[in-house]
Every structure is written in C-alpha cells, then in structure tokens.
Image (cartoon, helix red, strand yellow):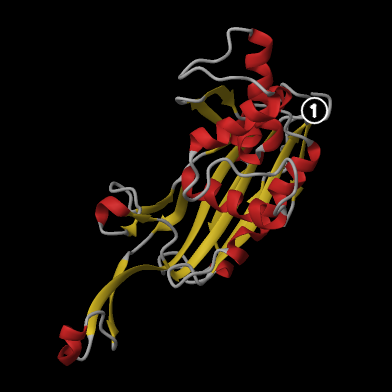
Amino acid sequence: MSNSINNRYEFVYMFDVTNGNPNGDPDAGNLPRLDPETNQGLVTDVCLKRKIRNYVALEKEKMAGFDIYIQEKSVLNNQHKKAYDALEIKHEAKKLPKNVAKARELTAWMCANFFDVRSFGAVMTTEVNAGQVRGPIQLAFASSIDPIVPMEISITRMAVTNERDLEKERTMGRKHIVPYGLYRVHGFISAKLAEQTGFSEDDLQLLWRALTNMFEHDRSAARGEMAARKLIVFKHDNAMGNAPAHKLFGLVKVLRVDGEEGSPARKFTDYKIEIDGNIPEGVTVQEVF
C-alpha cells in the first residue's frame, strides 16, 4: 500500500509506577510480575498493547479504519464476518475462499478497518477464517531498571455483601503494590511488514500519541500513579535499516544520580538517562518526550 511507512524504527520506552501494581499475575494471586532470579519487575507486551488499543479506541471512537479487533467481550468470528459481509463473500467453516485474490481481499479488509490488526498482526484462522497477518509493530517485555519489592497491603471494607453478614462490621482484603519502579521496554517497527498491512505515517503518529498518553486514561486503584517518562525513537533512513536493533538499544543508558547508589529509588529524578553520541550512519535519534 502506497501510504505505508518507508523507514524502519526501533524505540526505547520508559514508564514508572508509584505505589501501584503495573501488571498483576493472576497465577500468583495478582502479585506484580517479576523475574525470580533478579527480582526485576516485568510487564508483558500483551499488557502494553492493551493500553495502546484502549487509547486508540478513545481517540478514534467510531472513526472508520480505527476499530479494535481484540477488545473486551468481542467475538472474533463476528469480527471476521464483517469482512465477509462487506465484500459479499460466502464463508466455509475454517476455510479461506479458494480464490486467492478473494482470500487476500478479506485479510486486506481486516487490516484496513482494524488498527490493531494492521499494527500488531493477528491470527484469524478461526471457524470464520480471515487469514493471518504479521504485524509491523512488536514489543518486548518491560523490565524494571532495579529490583522491585512487592508489598502486600491489608485493606478493610465497612460494608458487607449479604445481610447475613451484617454483624461482622467489616470485611478484610489485600492488594499488592510496588513502592516504586521505573520500567524499560524495547519496540520494533518494520517498514517491510507495514507494506503488507498498510500501517501508515498517520498510524505511526497515533502510536506515539498512545505511548505518550495511554496511562492518563488507565487510572484505577491499582494504577493511580503510572506515568510515561521517556520515548526515544531510532529512525533508519530506509526500510531495511542501517544498524542492528540491539546496538541501538545499547546506546541508551539509565543510571542512578550521583550519591544515590545503594539506596532505593522512589522517584523518576533518582535516575538519569543518557544517549551515547556514537549513532550509526543512516540512523537519527529523536526524543519524543
């Protein structure tokens, strides 16, 4: 598609949490996720993509081309049926149309109409088969810069659910928090895969806005103080790229401020972020914020 991006990108994104739970693990009683060997906090790529989807849904509500494929209580087969109905194609259970052009048309319709399909890709080979898409955007897990110390806090509720419990006066509960954690995640954007899905320059700017603002629309008791802190973008001057991603990521250093080594970090200003000036030829660096 002619409107797709022409450059490869990588980016380093940093966010922090104060007295909150950025990504609870349901298999561990909703404890904050962490690496058991280093005690560094973890936030999954799925969690971050969810917040991007939610932001796009808010900004682009009811706008054509910006529907969200993976959303709460969505039925994926019904999402696929939208493409069949729009293109007036009859579907066979679990099969794409035998006509290759029609099969591609179905998948292209899904990319054109669902932001997250053309951004992150999707496996749509369900009973109503709409094909499979490799998305141009990939995110790694976010890891905290320093080890985190998950805390379990007891809470009380003065109300009761059932009348029979009225004499109990109060009920007890627990919540898990991280006192403070600065998290770093690496992202990748392939121009070549963007050609296949139609991920455009406008979509790219929307992604940057989502990363900038997504925590502002994700407040909850568990995530009251989460903030986007830094977005550093590496732009290659062509679609294939001019340097390996890991070398670019290695140029971004996160250090404790002078005199703070050994003491626990409790705010973003306890860190400083430096970018090595030895940028490979053909790559430009932009600090979005």
Q: Is residue 247 visible?
A: no
Residue occupying the point 46% across, 19% down:
93
Residue at point 78%, 29% (across, down): 4
The vertical placement of 288 against 140, above or below, is: below
Q: Is residue 149 visible?
A: yes
At horizontal 74% and vertical 52% (from top left) the residue drawn is 288
Left or right side of 242 for 216: left
Residue, disc 1 = 6
Mark 1: amino acid:
Asn
Point out the residue furthest to the right here.
Answer: 2
Q: Residues within 10 Å of mark 1 (few under 14, many from 20)?
A: some
Give 10 or 201, whichever is nearer the viewer. 201
Residue 167 horizontal/vertical position (percent): 15, 92
- Residue 118 image position (x, y, % from top left): 65, 33
Query: In front here: 277 or 64?
Result: 64
Dividing the picture into quadrants, the one containing residue 263 is bottom left
- Left or right relative to 141: residue 60: right
